[in-house]
Structure formats: C-alpha cells, structure tokens
Image: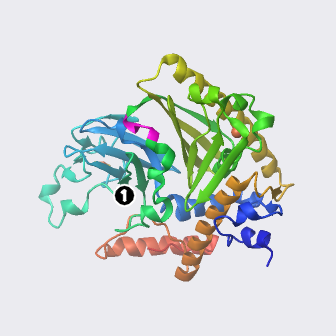
Amino acid sequence: MAPAFLNYLGFGGRDSVAEDKSPIRALPASWYTSHEMFELERRAIFSKKWLLTTHAGRLPQPGDWLKFDVTGYEIVLARDRQGKINGFHNVCRHRAFSVVEGKQGNAKIFACRYHGWSYGLDGKLAKAPKYDELEGFDKTKNNLFPVHVHVDSKNFIWVNLDSCEAPEPWSNQFAGIDLQERYKQFNFEDYILDHEYQLDGSYNWKILADNFNECYHCPTTHPDLPTLADITTHDVVGELGYIRHQSVLNEDQERDGLGISSTYYFPNVSVSVLPHFMMLQRFLPYGPTKSSMHYQIFRNKNSSDKDFKLISEMYARVVSEDKALCEQVQKNLNAGIIVNGELHPRLEKGPLYFQKVDREAIRAHVELEKAAGGEIWPARQKLPGSAHVSLEDEELCAGLACQTDQKKLLW
Ligand code: FES
Ligand SMILES: [Fe+2]
C-alpha cells in the first residue's frame, strides 16, 4: 500500500510522514463543521486525554484556586493546606450550582451560594445544612466530582476528566517531554504570570492547531518572524502526543532571547518558552465553529521590561495574524465547496501529525462505542446501583433520544 494512503488511514509511524514524498490529504471539512463531531470530540478527547492547564507557580499559597473552562466543563484547581493541588468540577453535588464564581481567589472552604453546602480544599463535603436530620445520607458519597491532576517535573499542571479510577497514564502520551534537553537551561520557577488574554473567534479548534503546527505560512503572513528566528530552518518532530518545534538562531537572535521553541501538547495546548518570556496557549472549543485562543503570558522575573516586551509584543502580533487566517478558512469550510486539500509532507508535517493523533483518538473511541452499542461519556458521573429510580428515569430519556437521534445513553 502506498505510504501516503497508510498515513491517511493513520497507520504511518513516527517518521513516515516526514519521509513521504507525496502530498497527503487533510482531514475533511466535515470534521471542522459538524456538531456531531464536536460532541464526539468532547467524549473521545476532552473527557479522557491529559490536558495541560497551567503552571503551579500560579497557586503559591494554601487556599489559592483557579477556574478553567474546557469544552463546557468548568474545573477548579486548588492548593490545599498540605500543599497538594486538587482538581474538581465546579458543580455542587446538591443541585448543580457552581461552587466557585469568578476566575480565581483564595478560600478556606468552598461554600455553594445556592443552599449553603460547603466543601474543603480537597473537594470533600464539609457541611450540608439540615442533612444531619436525614437517615441514609452519606456525606462521603457527596464530595465534589474529582478530576485527576498530574504535576510534571517542571511544575506544569495537567488534568484528566475521566471519572474512572485509573485514566490513561500521562506517560502514554507525554513520557519525558518535561525533561526535554532545551528545558534544562530554564528555571521555570522564575516565570511569573504577567497577564492573560483571549481571542474569541469563529473557527474550529483544529483549524487553530493545524495553523500553529506549521510555518509554511510564516513567510507570507508574519512579517515579524524573520526577526524571531531563521524560519527556513523551522522543523517539527511529532512523537506520542506532542509536537516539538525548533529553529536555528543567528547571533543577534540568540543575544536578544528570541526564537521559536514551542511544544504542542495534543489536543489543545502549547508552551513556548524563551529566556525572557513564556506563553501557555490553550485552544478552547465552544462549538464546532466557535473557539477561543486563551493566553497565559509569563515573564522571567529577572528580565528587563524591554527584553520581555520585545518578544511578548511580537508574539501577540503573530497570534492575531493567525486568528484572521483561521476565521477566513472556517468561513470557506462552512460554505461547503472544499472537502480537503493536499498537505506537504515536510512543510506541513506538524498538522499531519496532529491530524493523525486526532483521527486515532476518534476512531478508538468510536470502536468502543460500537462495541458498547451507544455513546460513552467518560467524564460523566457514575450513579451508584442504589439509585434505581434515577437509572430507570435515565433509561426512559435515553429511549426518547433513541427514537429521535438513533442514540442511546450508556453508563
Ligand atoms: S446547589 Fe449547592 S447547595 Fe444546593
Ligand atoms: Fe502563524
């Protein structure tokens, strides 16, 4: 079978994309426009893959918390009094109000404003007013829904929303990426959050990923980039769940702390770290054709204003140029003329690798759903066997969905 065809099916190995001399077809437009595909991605990817979220330096004190959104799931990260970082869904176990409002803060306890239930910094239910009158109410079964948290050796915080006890191991996708050679020159504790911002737009999150992971478009759309690095040397290496970007620097670029030194972490996050500046970029899908580019911009506390601003202003211009490109692409995909184009196996190795990992994740989940005979939502609450009536109610509703959408809910 021709290598290009094997790659299209997602069977290409680590380097086969690079070695290929034939163009390779991109994912079809339907994957970037369909509501069903977006919902499938919420199940197959965002509910069960490890998602890089922020750096632990943003939670220095016990009680510090931060709230993040991922495809409609709101999660809270909090440092407890033992120094451990815990993660949970921002959903009260009583009647589903949000336990935190706002984006960040410091708390001794999380008190839900609706009926006054309160939870510890570890998510454990502390008080449920008047529920001590009730028999058979087990406080320990009503903690906030936990999310799995992994803090890597550079103190980046990752979350996994899979509600099972043991999600896919982090190392399956990211083994060793926190120990990459070029990270050795940086002390990540020196990088302090300078500001955050977001760019909302009409594009599928994968258009943003495709765009970020190649520099074939750099000469035509980013006038700043030749200052940043020698873009003719830009290259990427895709392995497991990440894509490493690199480029060669001249003496001036080296001296000014410039460069392209990013790692893209499937599905939706990249970190670009340079001597004076670090950018943590998250692509947050809100729907098939709506996403936000969210930026956490850190500055090295030892760097001058001038050094930091040179690079930070340049990156801000580059990402706003990318935003305009992605919006135009989505508009044309929505119009329904193009199904897909042919990508360059060397110059578009990054998007091809991203699409391969995406396709594999989607297909693997679809196989599980086929075997199970219905949709599988890995992040969803698992009801205890004692909740008989709820299980029957759920089945009734799933039956309705079955008649209208040919779908059935699975527990
Ligand atoms: S919804 Fe939170 S206390 Fe009722
Ligand atoms: Fe770009």
Residue at far right of view: 337
Does 46 sit left or right of 189 as displayed? Answer: right
Does 110 sit left or right of 96 as displayed? Answer: left
Please tell me whether mark 1 sits on a helix, a strand or a loop.
strand
Ligand 1 contact, mark 1 (Cβ < 8 Å): no
Q: How is the image coloured?
A: rainbow
Q: Main secondary structure of the magenta part?
A: helix
- Identify residue for label 1: 148
Q: Is residue 206 magenta?
A: no
Does 178 appear above or below 200?
below
Does 296 appear above or below 89?
above
The part of the image, by quadrant, that contains residue 78 is: top left
Q: Quadrant of the N terminus?
A: bottom right
Residue 287 position, x and y percent, is 62, 50
Q: Residue at x 16, y 51 (%)?
A: 130
Residue at far front of view: 251
Image: magenta residue range: 185-189
